[in-house]
Amino acid sequence: KTNNSRHSSSSSFIHSFIHSLKLPFFFDIPDLKKQTAMPMKTLREYVRQQLCLWKSNNSNDSWTVDCDTNAVRYAISISFAGTDTVRGEPTWEWGLQHYVGGVGIADKIAVTRFIMSFPLFQDLRSNSFQVCSTCPRTDEITSFASVREYDTAAEQAKWCKWLRQGWHTMVDLLTLFLYHRESLPRLFTDKKYRADTRRLEQKFDKFEEKIDAWHQQILPSSTAGLHWYVHMVGVNPAHQGKGQGKALMGQLNKLADASNRVMYLEAGEPNRVFYEKMGFRVQRTEYFVDPLDHSKEVDPFPLHLMTRHPNNSS
């Protein structure tokens, strides 16, 4: 929890400085349906307007793009990490196996919240929107998705990507430590887990490199370069099995159809059938082997690269 009473004038200045580094430049942009990348403000505002329009026709609709960042971070952590009785997100479970499998759920959630803050912050810096549904009684986030407008040609042209990522990582760390009053999870500071933490970092670095390359191969700039990357999707374990995931993807499908956007995502095998029912099709399946695990007993992890094309009849 954030204790605002501990903020001094100097720390408030630092908070403002950090956020000033992350503010995008806003420009007037033409119609969304044109194949033109959109700044974050315009894309998010467009989605907000669409949700408000649909909500006027359905007063029970609780979808919003005005999601509190800390609430989203918590929703990501519990939906990806799972609980003692509900399995976490398959790709994330595979990523953490052999490393934090023997720790309690509280430590697992803490590690997940900390690590997944970085891709979330990356999305917030990008042309993206985050859509959430909330429980009317508690205002708790029941499901969420983070969707980024992805320009393949622009991504391929980022020759200094490694330098920019290093700078953004430093800014994100300062944001976590100073603004969100976050501390390193115990698993990152306990000497007992230090070797596992290094292996975990190396594993995800290799994984990220591969999925970036696969993504650009599936949707090259010569075809459908500009599209929506469904980067993160999750449902609160307490609300799973109630149609929340189907309703969430239904909203994304409506938004993509209205804006004439192809959607792309990666899915582990347990989620493949669900996404196929939502209109996605497997374009390719890649198998990822932990580069640090030389055990012949460990099966490669299948990752399905899936796309959904807009329904132009809607």
Image (cartoon, rainbow, N blue to C red):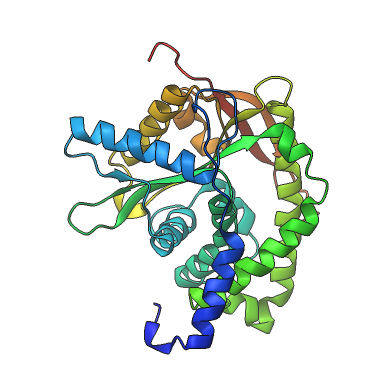
Which residue is the extreme one toward the top? 313
Q: Nearer the viewer, residue 27 or 170?
A: 27
Q: Is 81 above or below relative to 6?
A: above
Residue 222 is left or right of residue 115, and the answer is right
| x then y, percent, for residue 72 | 42, 57
Q: Is 98 above or below relative to 103?
A: above
Residue beneath the point at 69% across and 70% down: 197
Residue 206 is left or right of residue 174, and the answer is right
Residue 2 visible from this viewpoint: yes
Q: Nearer the viewer, residue 253 or 214?
A: 253
Residue 93 is left or right of residue 83, and the answer is right
Hey, which quadrant is residue 302 in on the image?
Answer: top right
| x then y, percent, for residue 192 | 67, 81
Residue beneath the point at 38% across and 27% down: 254
Q: Nearer the viewer, residue 76 or 69?
A: 69
Specify the quadrant that holds the C terminus: top left
